Amino acid sequence: MDQSVLDAMAKWPNVPAAYGWLSLNQAGLWRFHPGGEYQRGVVGESITNPQLIEFIGRNYTHDERGCWFFQNGPQRVFVGLDATPWVAYLDEHLALRKQNASPIEIIEHWYIDEDGKLYASTPEGLVLIQGRDVQSLFDQFTLKQAPDAMPIALQEEHLMQVLEQGITLRLEHTNESYSAPFSAIKQAEIESIGGFVAVPTPEAIN
């Protein structure tokens, strides 16, 4: 966190938290909700100021219950999540970066849901891959059908096996830290598997 934020927290430790004013959408964009009336899927107003976006990204974290928030000086502004706490995109080097531009160093598990959305489990939390980059990422994967077999390209039939038969494959990537098991996930399971609260409320953290 910024030192100015840490100083403000120490100076004013009991500022009430705010709920429903800020959200993160499935494209990794921050949205403002006048009146604190966020509900999942409500579009809200775009936040476009680059300095503010960077400030939010540097001071974004979570509490012990999995409620994510932006520490705005002495005040916690809890974030409504349309999908997951993190949304990643491929940069010009085909490396994954989160919405605050920080790199994804390690992937522990890949998941695909019933709508074909791709997720990555990382030490920092569950990540949704931006839809526009999913096919490019699939094109980078290979898999081995046996330990001594030559790697083959990931095909649609493999995705169907994961989704329809419930099998787990291991995806291989030239970046070894991106190589990980790959299995199906249901949208109803995402919060519990990801260990986060999509819509924080005062009751959720008391």
Image (cartoon, helix red, strand yellow):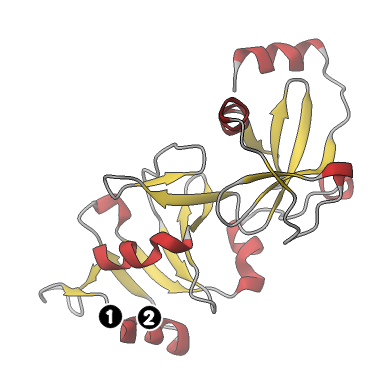
Q: Are marks 1 and 2 in contact (CB under 8 Å)?
A: yes
Estimate how packed mark 1 is, as few (under 14), some (14 to 19) or many (20 or more) residues with alpha carbons within 10 Å: few
Please state which of residues 42 and 95 is positioned toward the viewer in this rendering.
Answer: 42
Residue 68 position within the rendered picture, expressed as x and y whole percent measured from the top left: 68, 43
Q: Residue at x 72, y 61 (%)?
A: 41
Q: Residue at x 61, y 65 (%)?
A: 190
Residue 47: which quarter of the image?
top right
| Numbered badge on residue 204 | none
Q: Residue at x 59, y 46 (%)?
A: 29
| 55 left or right of 20 in image | left
Residue 22: which quarter of the image?
top right
| Image quadrant occupied by the N terminus | top right
| Image quadrant occupied by the C terminus | top right
Please state which of residues 37 and 80 is positioned toward the viewer in this rendering.
Answer: 37
| 36 left or right of 25 in image | right
| 95 left or right of 61 in image | left
Q: Amino acid at mark 2?
A: Leu
Which residue corresponds to mark 1?
155
Query: Outermost residue, bottom direction?
Result: 165
Residue 200 position within the rendered picture, expressed as x and y whole percent measured from the top left: 79, 49
Q: Find numbered disc 2 in the image and state the secondary structure of the residue it sits on.
A: helix
Can you say whether 161 is above or below 100 in the image? below
Which residue corresponds to mark 2?
159
Q: Residue at x 63, y 36 (%)?
A: 61
Please state which of residues 203 and 44 is positioned toward the viewer in this rendering.
Answer: 44
Please state which of residues 102 and 33 is positioned toward the viewer in this rendering.
Answer: 33
Can you say whether 100 is above or below 129 in the image? above
Report whether residue 161 is seen.
yes
Estimate how packed mark 2 is, as few (under 14), some (14 to 19) or many (20 or more) residues with alpha carbons within 10 Å: some
Q: Amino acid at mark 1?
A: Gln
Residue 93: which quarter of the image?
top left
